[in-house]
Image (spheres, rainbow, N blue to C red):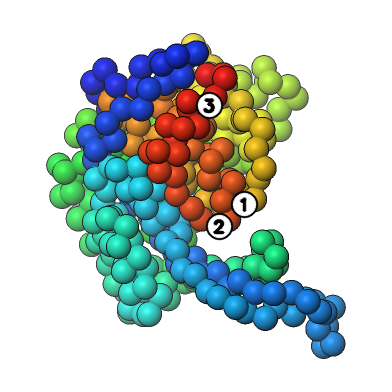
Amino acid sequence: MARSRGAGTAGPAGRPDLPDFARARVLVVGDVMLDRYWFGDVSRISPEAPVPVVRVERTEERPGGAANVARNAAALGATVGLLSVVGEDEPGSALERLVRAEGVRASLHRDPTLATTVKLRVIGRQQQLLRVDFETAPSYEVLADKLSEFEASLANYDVVVLSDYGKGGLAHIERMIAAARARGRTVLVDPKGDDYARYRGASVVTPNRNELREVVGRWKDEADMAARAERLRAELGLDALLVTRAEEGMTLYRAGSVQHEPTKAREVYDVSGAGDTVIATLAVMLGSGAAIAAAVRVANHAAGIVVGKLGTAVVHPGELAADLATSTGP
């Protein structure tokens, strides 16, 4: 874990105070994508098939995947680097332009054989009607070059986030974790798939409820879930396992302790990117010197804020401070 510098202590009613986010230096590595949104009016059903007709009125582009993690960390005020692979194409250029505009130090390797991953969402009446994905896996040669740059970049960052979306951008994740931990860096992993052995030795792994179930099987009650989570944490040699549980909040499992953070009742518009916000906030809190218990509480508040926004969105320090100030619980 990043060394505590006295920040993130408990405030009134057990609420954690926010540390100086500008202290945090976060490197995000993983699968990036371009999120495109087509917003329009839906007023009729197509005569060609039983589907709605959307008259597109405006479009938006936002960084997605690991790029969304990076922009979330930058929005909180951290120094953020982003290392990934994109295609030699228009979406790749658009993605690089977007993340740089948000203050992220982007190093996006270009692979002419790769099409930059694009997720196109069609939105009508504030509801997602359709998502279309365009993607191919990066070549091994580009990934090997990225590994060398990753190892060289570690001197400039305190916390590393490995954002695994299963698109092939983290083929060398075992070596990345080992290299970062050997240099004393805190390593957070947003996992994918059922092979968690690749994440062995990380500081914290952050599966959602369904992802955890894929790995440890179905649990019968809370005690059974805790036992399964602790076995997984111990087997992988993790400092902690943080399980995000949608409407049930999130639970942090550490050796000999369980910390549960319930959700606050809110109107939920969109859960897209909520996991990105959680791991980004956790990384910035830890990089700012906060203890992990406080970091999890603040990340839970950040997730609650972002699900009230449409699409992949970010949370700003002022929003977090206001939400923490109005909270009556921890």
Name the residue at 64% across, 50% down: 269
Q: Residue at x 30, y 62 (%)?
A: 101
User: Based on the displayed image, in which of its 4 quarters is residue 8 positioned?
Assistant: top left
* Circle nearer the N terminus (1, 3): 1
Residues marked 1 and 3 touching at CB (< 8 Å): no
Q: Amino acid at mark 2?
A: Gly
- Residue 311: mark: 2
Q: Nearer the viewer, residue 129 or 318?
A: 318
Q: Secondary structure at mark 2?
A: loop
Crowd tier of the residue under label 1, counting other residues whose Cα lies within 10 Å: few below 14, some 14–19, many 20 or above: some
Residue 246's x, y, as percent? 63, 38
Reading the image, the residue beneath label 1 is: 270
Say which of 189 and 61 sits in front: 61
Q: Residues within 10 Å of mark 2 (few under 14, many from 20)?
A: many
Between label 1 and label 3, give the one nearer the viewer: 3
Classify residue 25 by image quadrant.
top left
Question: Vertical placement of 234 versus 315: above or below?
Answer: above
Nearest to the eye among marks 3 and 2: give it. 3
Residues tagged 3 and 2 counted as in contact (Cβ below 8 A): no
In the image, is 36 to the left or to the right of 172? right
Where does the image place residue 230, in percent across and percent down from the top left?
54, 21
| Residue type highlighted by circle 3 | Thr
Residue 146: image x %, image y %?
Answer: 26, 59
**Seen in the image, is 322 located left or right of residue 142?**
right
Give left or right: position of 209 versus 284.
right
Label 1 and label 2: CA atoms lie apart by 6 Å
Circle 3 is placed at which residue position?
Answer: 326
Nearer the N terminus, badge 1 or badge 2?
1
